[in-house]
Image (spheres, grey):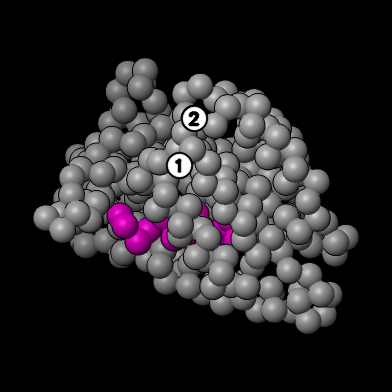
Amino acid sequence: MTAKIISGIEIAKQITEEIRREVAELKTCHGIVPGLATILVGDDPASHVYVGSKVKTCQNLGIHSERYNLPGSTSEAELQALLGKLNNDPQINGILVQMPVPKHIDETKIIFAINPAKDVDGFHPTSVGRMLIGEPSFLPCTPHGIQVLLERSNINPDGAEVVVVGRSNIVGKPIANILLQKAKYANATVTICHSATRDITDHTRRADILIAAMGKPHFITADMVKDGAVVIDVGTNEIGKTPDGKRILVGDVDFPAVKENAGAITPVPGGVGPMTIIMLMSNTVKAAKMAAGLI
Ligand code: GUN
């Protein structure tokens, strides 16, 4: 069997049009323009690419965006001061600090300093706690994007065995929690594997839905995947550059081999990545509506 390829590009395009209509309606009916501030500290080239895509998508959708590119020498106090200003700026509904931040800045303190009402990344403990107990909250963009990708591909995790490989705060832990909830397009039996798991293959081979999010190129091989399983690849690993300097990206899954026995699979690039950006836009619009008392 050759797997169905789940195109994040196509699904993100559909959602882009839905959000474009919503943004236009907010403007005409309520005079509201959602605003997103992105903050990047330092000159990591990959982070520049990611933030650039987020800013471009805002512009494409009519969302106001403010981009703060700060030097790598920026102190934690300076970053906190900028967050304080943006927390109180009525034109800004969402604040995103691109991770990772340089080592001299405490990432946790920075996340805590963002106004939870503007936490469009869903990283603040208020958002994380609400997600855990199943209360409405800002869901982190990559895990929420995975759930929507499944939903729009008519793959329902209800009652399924879901195995997540990787336990990061950005992907592994939240996707496990989202799919565990007693809710639509969730309600799964979830296992999380990590670096101390004794026999990862023993777990992954039982998965109806396998989510690879450990950041290791081609870690998931064909023998680790049950025939017909749905495989979601969250990895974006740079393994080199083309002669003209473009980054060569591969996922955490050995795509050419795994696609031969999986039932459905996301490619890298063009799978989960585009969903992350569009869910950020969705959260920003939601934050603007909440600020205006519309929801
Ligand atoms: N770094 C990698 N993924 C993300 C993300 O979703 N949000 C932020 N702020 N930083 C990231």
Disc 2, ligand 1: is the CB inside 8 Å?
A: no
Report the front residue among 276 and 205.
276
Whole-percent x, y for residue 77 in the image: 65, 27
Report whether residue 92 is seen: yes
**Residue bearing mark 2:** 73
Q: Is residue 223 above or below residue 58?
A: above
Left or right? Give the position of 194 relative to 71. Answer: left
**Residue 295 shows which numbered tag?**
none
Element carrying mark 2: loop
**Callout 1: few (<14), some (14-19), or many (20+) C-alpha neighbours within 10 Å?**
many
Upstream in the sequence, badge 2 or badge 1?
2
Q: Is residue 184 above or below residue 114?
A: below
**Callout 2: few (<14), some (14-19), or many (20+) C-alpha neighbours within 10 Å?**
few
Q: Quadrant of the N terminus?
A: bottom left
Q: How many marks?
A: 2
At label 1, the amino acid type is Val
Question: Furthest residue to the bottom?
Answer: 28
Q: Are marks 2 and 1 in contact (CB under 8 Å)?
A: no
Whole-percent x, y for residue 49 in the image: 39, 53
* Magenta highlight: main SS: helix
* Residues shaded magenta: 268-281
Q: What residue is shown at x 80% (from left), y 55% (from top)?
A: 90
Q: Is residue 204 above or below residue 76?
A: below
Report the front residue among 271 and 110.
110
Q: What residue is shown at x 18% (from left), y 49% (from top)?
A: 241
**Residue bearing mark 1:** 162
- Asked if residue 280 is among those painted magenta in the image, a careful observer would answer yes
